[in-house]
Image (spheres, grey):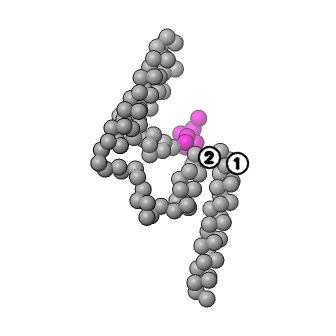
């Protein structure tokens, strides 16, 4: 798989990754079969621990300010995690949002 075609990590996945859990996950298939299950569970426990630690801190850096969040921003963020069919549906929704914005601007200026 090419580097450019990989799905990016979400903000929560970056928090869960901590310091290099993705590298540990990449190594799992190369471990002896008897160790793979235990190591996989260990990595998942570390991810949960990282997420819990993050949300126990007073500052939450990945949280978007609620007053600035809108449907268009959410759809654009979600878009990179969709398959082609889902992406087409989101593109239609984004096009509709943009069309409605233009219509509202025209109405405001008349």
Q: Is residue 23 visible?
A: no
Tell me residue 17's x, y (percent).
41, 35
Residue drawn at (35%, 49%) of the image: 60
Q: Is residue 70 above or below residue 1?
A: below
- Residue 70's label in the rendered image is none
8 over 19 or under it: above or below: below
Seen from the viewer's position, the closer of residues 6 and 76 is 76
Name the residue carrying label 2: 82
Find out whether residue 70 is within the magenta segment: no
Q: Does residue 65 appear to the left or right of 94 in the view shown?
A: left
The single residue placed furthest to the bottom in the displayed view is 110
Work out whether 95 lies above or below 13: below
**Secondary element at image label 2:** loop
Q: Are marks 2 and 1 in contact (CB under 8 Å)?
A: yes
Q: Residues within 10 Å of mark 2 (few under 14, many from 20)?
A: few
Does 25 sit left or right of 104 as displayed? left
Find the magenta span and give its range.
Answer: 1-7
Q: Which residue is mark 1?
A: 85
The part of the image, by quadrant, that contains residue 89 is bottom right
Q: Position of residue 77 (x, y in %)?
A: 53, 53
Position of residue 49 in the picture relative to residue 71 (left or right): left
Mark 1 Cα shell of 10 Å, populated few (<14), some (14-19), many (≥20): few
- Image quarter of residue 13: top left
Q: Quadrant of the C terminus?
A: bottom right
Question: At which x and y percent is residue 30?
Answer: 49, 18
Helix, strand, or loop for circle 1? helix
Residue at horizontal 63 percent and vertical 72 percent from the top: 100
**Disc 2 from disc 1: Cα separation:** 8 Å
Q: Position of residue 104 (x, y in %)?
A: 60, 78
One can see residue 89 in this view = yes
Q: Looking at the rendering, in which quadrant would you find the N terminus?
A: top right
């Amino acid at each position: 798989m090419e580097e450019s075609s990989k799905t990016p990590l979400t903000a929560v996945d970056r928090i869960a990754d901590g310091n290099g859990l993705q590298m540990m996950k990449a190594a799992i298939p190369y471990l002896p079969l008897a160790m793979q299950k235990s190591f996989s569970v260990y990595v998942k426990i570390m991810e949960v621990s990282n997420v819990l630690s993050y949300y126990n801190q007073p500052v939450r850096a990945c949280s978007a300010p609620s007053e600035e969040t809108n449907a268009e921003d959410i759809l654009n963020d979600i878009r990179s995690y969709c398959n082609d069919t889902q992406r087409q549906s989101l593109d239609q929704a984004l096009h509709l949002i943009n069309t409605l914005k233009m219509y509202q601007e025209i109405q405001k200026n008349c």
